[in-house]
Every structure is written in C-alpha cells, then in structure tokens.
Image (cartoon, helix red, strand yellow):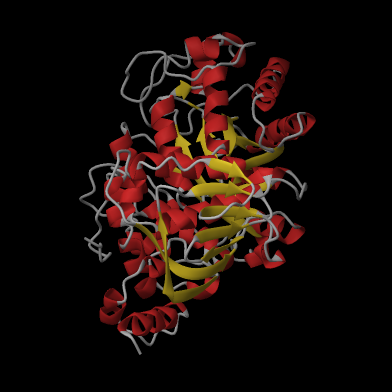
Amino acid sequence: MTSKRLRAALTALLLAGSGVLVTGIAAEAATPLNELVPQPVQLQPHPDITFTLTASAKIQLGPETARKPAELLAGILRPSTGFALPITDGVTGEGIVLLNNADPKTGPEGYQLDVTPKQVVIRANTTAGHFNGISTLRQLLPPKAEAKTKQPGPWTVPGASILDHPRYQHRGAMLDVSRHFFTPDQVKRYIDQIATFKINYFHLHLSDDQGWRLEINSWPELTKIGGSTEVGGRKGKLFYTQDQYKDLVQYAQNRGITVIPEFDMPGHTNAAQASYAELNCDNKKRPLYTGTEVGFSSLCISKEITYKFIEDVVREVSAITPGPYFHIGGDEALSTPDADYVKFMTRVLPIVKKYNKTTVGWHEFIKTTKDTSLVPQFWGTTTSDANVAAAAQRGNKVLMSPANRIYLDMKYNKNTKLGLDWAGLVEVKDAYSWNPGAYLNGVTEAGVRGVEAPLWTETIRTSADIEYMAFPRLAVAAELGWAPASVHNWDRFAPRLGAQAPRWKVQGINFYASTQVPWKK
Ligand code: TNX
C-alpha cells in the first residue's frame, strides 16, 4: 500500500466511526475529509484523486435554481484565489459543476458531491441542497480560500464522493438585537458566519423591554421612542428601517437562510408601552428601560387597541417577510395573569394565520392551542414539560433550545467575562452532550423539528462579543441539527471541531479557545 492509500484507508475507517483508531493516527491522517462540521451522512475518500481549482475554472450551472448558490461560491472564491471564475450556463469542462438529478435519498435539502480530477460536481434537487453542498466544498478547500484578499494557491480538493442530508429540517441561530442593537453590517457578518454550518433559519428577536427595532409605518413612535436606547442607556436611531430589514432578509436568502422575525408579547413589551400610552391599561406611557430584569411588562389584554396594534405589526412585517414563520415570543409573561395569557393568545394566533404565517413561539404558548401546525420552541432547563409533551403527542414539532445546553449567552465557565449564568455554565462539551431527539420526556425524534442556538445580548455589545459566545458552540448546535445521531461521539467530534480553528482565524472570528478542544494550529 502506498502511504497515500494507507492514509486514505485510515481515513475511511475513522469516518466509518469504528472507534478503533486512536487520535494519534487520526492526526497523521489529517485531511479535510475528516474535518467536516457537520459530519456528512456518507463519505467515500478517493485517495488517488485530487482536484485543483485553476485560473481557467468556471462555475457551471445546470439548473437555474443553482444560480444563487453559484453566486455565493464565486463571491467567496474570487477574492481569495484572484481567479475570474465566471458563472456559465451549461456544463463545459473544468471547474465546479452544479447539477440536479441527485439521488432521491438526498431529500429536500441534501446533495451529492463528487470530486474528479477536472471537476467538483455538486448534485442537488433544490436550491437549499446546492447551498449545503457549497458549504461542504468550502470546508474541503484550504482555509485561506475564505480570505478577503488574494492568496497563493494551490487550491486543492481531496478526492471523495459524498452523499449528505440533514437529520432535522430546522437548524437555527437567533440574535437578540433588542437588548443591544446591532447594525445591519454586524448582523450580516453573523449571517455569513452561521451560513458556513448549513444553518437554514435565522431568528431575529426584534422587540423587548429595552428596544423596538423595526420601523412600523402605522405606529411610528415604536422606533422613534422605543428604538432610541438599549441596555446601558446608549442613545441613537437604534432600529432598522423596513428597507434595511428587507435587505437583511434578502442577504440571508442569498445564503440559503430564511429569516424568522420575532415580536415578543404579551410580556417583554416595555419599549412599545413607552412609545404609546394607549397600549397601557392605565393610559400612561412607561419610562424607557435600560436594565436587564425580565417579567415586569405586559400589554393590556382587555383593550381592543392592543389587537389592532398587533394586527398592524403582523400585517406590515408579514408583507416584507417572504419566509412562512412569525415568532410571537410568549415567554416569561410573569405580569400577565394565566387566564389573560390564554385570552391573549386566543386572539393573537388567528391574526398570524390571517396573514398566512405559521406561529413559532417560546414553548409556554403551546398550552393555549391545539393547532398542531404551530411550533413551540423549548427553552427550559428541565427534561420534562407536560404541555410540550402533550403538544408533541398531538403532532406538534418542537424546536429545541434548552437553555442549559445551547443558550449561547451562558458563560462557558465562572471566569468567562461575558454572558449570564442563570441556566448554568455551558462548556463546549456540555453544549454537545445531549440528544435533541431523546431529551424531553414524551418528545421523540419524530416530534423534534430541529435545534436553534439563541444568543441573548444583555452583556453582548460588539461583533467580537457575539463571536466569542457563538464560537465554537454555534458549530456544536449545527452538528447536532445536521449530523446523523449515529455519529454522536465527543471524542471523535472534538478533533473535527478543533480543525475549524485555521478557517476561523482566516475569517477573523474571535472564538473561545476552550481547553476541551484540540485546536488545530
Ligand atoms: C430568558 S429564554 C429569556 C430572555 C433573556 C434570557 C437570558 C427566553 C425565552 N427569555 O428574555 O434574555 O433568558 O439568558
């Protein structure tokens, strides 16, 4: 056996998840093929083949549905390689080829990727599948392919055949832009980062006690007053215009990501109550709030104007949100009596439906409805919740965000300067060591819609802060949401995660270098 063949055989064994090989050998057999996050379903190395991207390569389109993914790839590779990489209609030779007619096993989001000496062929039956295949190709290229400036080659891709599809339909990330506001450019930077891990939903938490962050034409004071400050008291125009929001939605869509807008209600509403007197039962405006307490605010459940307000918001936001979901919050309504909470949801859920959106809400809301198409998002710290279990048994699909596992704002350890610790300290291994499909009593694999990693921003102010809390745990969430349950194993995952470090350094990501992970130099 040639050493190349030996290496490949070792790689194949490792990838088969035999568990027989020790990490020393894994290090020797280092190849991008055993460094993929998330881990693909099937991967066959072809050790005698290497593809090298050259100056004459083209990105070749079979179906028109692959154009956006092709543009994304070109946008990444043109600056770093310095190559022209034209996108061509039809398949004409050397380069990267995007085709359809993928194996039906790839499903609505999967892809096949085959590396030959002259081509990398990505086959998928959907645009989502091509986006996902391109995420894999990016990780098969050298890390410097992610650079914003021209780098020396060679631009090699190891020979392999991959067939891949996700465990769950929903892999999500959430950013709270209410506690601290983040500019459109900061949000785009995060969208770019989440896209590299095949995350397909981006949840924007757009209103809370501290700020209302999206312009609503029929209620202009929401942003004029409610969007004028944030935690800590900074002043400014701390909101998105509708055009800026539309641009963010499009930016995400161009990376294979659907935006889910959240307007939290009936609690977490102080910013709205500070903007309009009529949203308060006593007709008195609340003062703006720049602290970090929760649970003190509530819309006025008994007033008709409350529902007019909500309908105006849902109508305006739905009109500029192409995705099918609207998140109504519904968490920690500690100042809303139980009976009022039920009354409120009974009014609000049909409004969301009227504007053709499907409601997502923090899991508390699911006790108020028997509609199995709605999506409860579990954020608790326990492994049982009777209302969520009952909903799952009726047929609701649960989005899993257990706070003590996957809240990106929890501190890693007691010395972490940023973040909170109310749900516990969450080191990287804690974030990984749970099974979304067997975590909540009464919620089986089939009852789980997916995994979302929320980032609350009471203590988070800058992109560097976002990155420190999200990396590496966001990659962990993506692995849990995509990779087959059968590959779940910390000892094999940790080196794969550690192998992302060179790429994150090129991308300028301020990640937390946990001592639990063997980081690649
Ligand atoms: C709980 S979890 C909240 C948020 C806070 C977060 C901080 C949930 C649905 N609500 O209002 O920002 O904890 O970790």
Q: Quadrant of the N terminus?
A: bottom left
398 w.r.t. 187: above or below:
below
Can residue 281 be seen by looking at this rendering? no
- At x 34%, y 60%, the residue is 428
Q: Quadrant of residue 341?
A: top right
Residue 346 position, x and y percent, is: 75, 34
- At x 35%, y 54%, the residue is 472
The foreground one among 58 and 148 is 58
364 w.r.t. 515: above or below:
above
The foreground one among 182 and 383 is 182
Q: Quadrant of residue 78?
A: top left
Residue lying farthest to the bottom in this orientation: 1
> Quick check: 432 left or right of 26?
right
The foreground one among 248 and 410 is 248
> Quick check: 338 left or right of 511?
right
Q: Quadrant of the C terminus?
A: bottom left
Can residue 147 be seen by looking at this rendering? yes
205 w.r.t. 65: above or below:
above
Residue 115 position, x and y percent, is: 50, 65
Residue 367 position, x and y percent, is: 68, 47
- At x 67%, y 43%, the residue is 64
Residue 325 position, x and y percent, is: 66, 38
How many numbered circles are shown?
Answer: 0
